[in-house]
Image: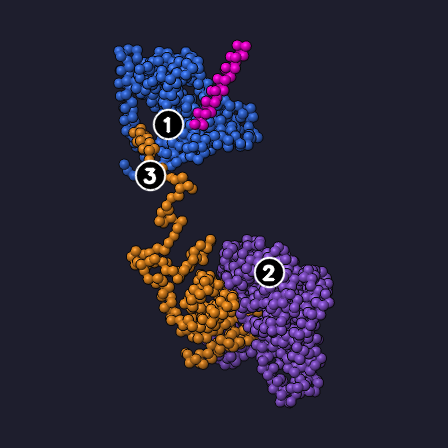
Chain colours: A orange, B blue, C purple
Amino acid sequence: MLGILKALRTTVSHLPRKPLTVQYPEVREELPERSRGLFKVVVDVTTEEARCRACTLCETNCPVQVIRVDYRNKYDLPAVDQAALARDRLAEQGAVDLSPLRPIIDGHLESGTGLNAVLQRVQDAYGYLPRAALQQLSLETGTSLSQIYGTASFSDRFRLAPPAAHIISVCRGTTCYAAGAPLVAQALREALGIDADGTTADGFVTLQSVDCLGVCGPAPVVRVDDRVHVAMTPERAHALVQELRVAEGVT
Amino acid sequence: MDVFLDILRGLVAVIIAYAFVFISALVNIVFERRTLAFMQDRLGPNRTGPQGILQSVADSFKMLGKEDFAPAAVDKRLFTLAPIMVMIGAVAVQLVIPYTKGWTGQDLNIGIIYIVAVTSFTVLAILIGGWASHNKYSLVGALRSAAQMVSYEVPMILALLVVAAATSSLSLNDVVSAQAGYQWFVFVMPTTFFIFFIASIAELNRGPFDLPESESELVAGYGTEYSGMRFGMFFLNEYAGMTIMSMVTVTLFFGGWEGPGEDLLVLWGVSVIPFVWFMIKTYVLVFALVWIRLSVPRLQVNELMAFAWKLLIPLGLANILASTAIILWAPQWKWVMAGFSWVVLIAIVGLFDPLLRRRLRRKHAQAPSLTRGTA
Amino acid sequence: MSERADRIEAAFAHVFHPSMVSAREGEQEVRVCAATTCAGSGAGAVRDAFRDELTRRGLQQEWRVVETGCRGSCDQGPIVSVEPAGVFYPRVSPASVPRIVAETLVGGRPVEDLLYRHPDTGRPVARAADVPFLLGQRRLVLALAGRIDPASIDDAIAHERYRAFVEALIADEPDDVIDAVEESGLRTRVGDPGSVGSRWRRALDGTHDERFVVCTADEGDPGAFADRTVLESDPHAVIEGMLLAAFAIGARHGVVRVRRDHAAAGERLRGALVECRERGLLGRDILGAGLSFDIEIDAAERMLVCADETALIASLEGRRAVPRIRPPAPTEAGFRGRPTVVSDAVAYAAVPWIVRNGAAAYAAAGLHEHTGTRVFSLSGQVRNGGVVEVPAGTSLRRVVEDIGGGARPGRRLKAVQIGGPLGVCLPATALEAPIDDLAAGSSSLVVLDDRTCMVDLARHLLSISQREGCGTCVPCRLGTKRSLEILERIVDGRGRDGDMELLAELGTYCSQGTLCVLGGNASNPVLGTLRDFADEYEAHITERRCPAGVCRALITYSIDPEACTGCTLCAQRCPAAVISGREGQPHVIDVSGCTKCDICRQVCPDGAVRVRSGVSQAVAPGTA
């Protein structure tokens, strides 16, 4: 009973108070800092650095495309501009000479060739797609880095890390598959000492599976750098790797 | 010709009575919604009409616009009868209430009993509605509601009898006169008021006693199969009942139309100021009803019945005994009554919690709970 | 009207430089196929050998060496034919060139032992036209492939290229062109298989400032090379087809998607486009008829998902090749939001023939109620593979056995995989089916023999689709992944009861719940093999046996002591060094270390290595 009286007192005490709600939409409330309506880059108080890694995932995934990760205008942050991780990634790839990019970008801006062609030219120039080059490309063409990354990562042709000295490509078309390409691939993997497609530990050879090399008659087909070898067998695969090693003086 | 005029007058009175019921219901709805809102730190409906006073009108239009259908299996005549019948109580009570000085519909000399009799129509209407719906849940809801209302009529009557004893008359006008000079029965016998007030809340299916119509418990109880204006009738009746019951309470315990400035404004032989006081007091009580509804958690049906039969009725009986004894034999009975009643009320309020706790502890000690550790 | 005709004809005559025609009918030429496959087999050296030999004999004025496009018989490369007699030499090596020059060019006789041998009779076949591979074909789209030098526009024009275009320009009725294409029933492989003509007609709807013509030579499937062949061997056919399309729908720009790894095709097309521009067949106000059209090449990686038109268009726009929902169809809003017609190169190459010879003639080229011809890349365990063009409605049996020569000696035909990862696997018992709409995806037709494990093949094809899926639709992304996991388990010997039903269910949901062509057809190989080769699945799951002897987790290699002569060749070559035995004694394989690389079986001269599978130790075919 007393509790009820207390309850009655509590509720009536709210009567004279100012309501918490506002007459929306004539009056709009100031949104609190962490509400989902606005967002800004978080600065870690301990390290005083922006937590943003410029991964551009937010930009890629925003369903209404209202985010632009802009490398030109740095945020008003006390920390140094780029996130530490991006810097590390760049450092990993070493200094990249951007001069080969110039003609490519000029050509692109002139003729408007598709992004695929530009990326292929960049890969031809460097052997892979260095992040620094992609960033430069993004800056100059105005295409967001996430879009460039999306196109680049969508197909396995584009390499985002430096390749090995030699690239061995095993055709994985249906014909080659039916003719025994998996056995050849396995033999190559054994010979190179790797478990799956990729680069050997010493960076000697990158083994990759590629699509039709166009020589479907004498399958299976393997391409080493620029030379195409037809009618491969597991035994010849071993021999091939051996030859390569001997030629390079690698054990 | 006279007969014709009488009939016409009667019809007009009925129409005014019904209109009053509807209008008071509409007003109550907005009043409650806005009051609840303010007490909950929010605004409530304030867009339709200035400060939202036309909100109920808008709701009524909506309800009127709904498709009027009845499920195929219902008892058609009873299904249609129930919503119509439910309002009879609210309308008929208006006959005997003294609104202002010298202005009562019909000053029956059995006014109090008349009120009790007529409000029972609501119970009937609810039972009919539940039965006619051809839905077992509606029926259960209706039965619960009927049980609740019937159970709480007893303490209500017990309290009314004390008032009647104090007034030595059953006529409401006499009740008002007996309270003249600000000797309102709420000050003289607060315990009786307490019993009556709680019983009246239960009669109205309001506040903590609204189980029969709580949506989360039984869909809408007896009103499940009703929609549109049929449901609207039940709904409006509840809100109209708030006003009507408050008016009755004001008449019985708060001195009716008594208030300062009685004869200041007289229009066509009717004193306006007392009427204003009457309405103010009524709406204070309506506010109290809203307030209680917001603040007190709903009672379960077993708690509800237990409260009525095990608490209010014994209390009411004891109250009647003591009160009539005082009225009969005590000198200056009003003062004695007041002293006695206030002491009892304070005792009830003060001792309720500890006694309840002791009782519960004993009950739990008999059947130790597995989930609790050793006491 | 005739004044216009004269003007256009005059302009066209200006385009043609008759003196630069290299391949002429009826003149003395040595035609060397220089398409990719033959080039890969050494055609370059053969061509040089001919040139050297002719120079040495001083015959370079009398005999011309012409590099042509694909003759079709890619398995028999390098292919050489001596015209005008039409003597056909397969598998020419530079060493045989002097003999051929001496006896055939000078002496006029075919060199018997170098001729093509009929696979059944073993008798030599002198003329190309009599080779069974070419006999059964109806080369309509590939008419000029192998007859002209694809690098020469004059060759093409001399062989009636651009005639249809010029006549269409003169007549100036775009509707007639669309009518012809529509009535012919020409179909395209891109997107949902559909009629080319109806797409052109839909692109005409509404008012737009621009329309685009897109040709794709992507072919999606790793093993398809029909579009590539057309581009390598007769690029002007495709260009003319696109010109006709541009004329019909009023487009000003065209794009050709060429695969990066089809380097030769891209080069040929690039060269052809340059020539066209120089001669005025592309660019502004072509031949003074008012049409302005130019074509751009977009070279990109093969993407299976680009079998879907909207994904292809996204990729052309430089974005990720993710399909989008239709409507609106690309003919309504495609490349850059404008109406776009998309077809594969083979379809465009057929258009000039249709416009020139009429829809009825094209339709009549098909058998029964089918219209036109179909081009396929026939490969696999078949004796004669290559690019074939057959009348639509030809039965598979005819293509595989009569044209293709059937399975390799000693092997039994098991199934034919049509259309790549998005196509179907037909068992050998169903070969009477007519080729028409079976190939929804790519043009590849791979013949499989009894040494192909159908479960493993289904797994491989599904892995391509799963890898290439764009990831938008949950049923495709997750369905193919889970199906692949199940298949990998089965192939690994860990199949469970209920796997087959689960695969069927997943496959059905995947095909029903997806947006694009890839998702809708990715489960075709799985569902088809489950239905037609259920016994193989059951063997894998319940008996842990691979009937074909392919799935490495389920096979063991062993040497039949009866057959082994103890030559020690296998022991020498085994990279894992698990074969032991003394010389002259039967050798033994230590199964615990065997990596199943198959080298021992391949090098054994006595055929003593057995591949066994399952508890029953059934011997795999080809190893008994």
Tell me which chain the residue with mark 1 is part of.
Answer: B
Residue under the point 49% across and 75% down: A225
User: Which amino acid type corresponds to the residue marked 1 in the rendered image?
Assistant: Phe
Q: Which residue is mark 1?
A: B287
The residue carrying pointer 2 sits among few (fewer than 14), some (14 to 19) or many (20 or more) residues within 10 Å by Cα, namely many
Tell me which chain the residue with mark 3 is part of.
Answer: B
Overall secondary structure of the magenta section: helix
Residue under the point 37% across and 64% down: A86
| Residue B341, quarter of the rendered image | top left
Q: Which residue is mark 2?
A: C211
Q: Which residues are magenta?
A: B1-27
The residue carrying pointer 3 sits among few (fewer than 14), some (14 to 19) or many (20 or more) residues within 10 Å by Cα, namely few
Residue under the point 54% across and 56% down: C324
- Which comes sooner in the sequence, label 3 or label 1? 1
Q: Nearer the viewer, residue C84 or A210?
A: C84
Structural distance between the alpha carbons of marks 3 and 2 = 77 Å
Answer whether residue B12 is magenta in the image: yes
Give coordinates of residue A215: x percent, y percent: 57, 73
* Quadrant placement of the N terminus of chain C: bottom right
Residue under the point 66% across and 86% down: C61
Q: Which residue is mark 3?
A: B371
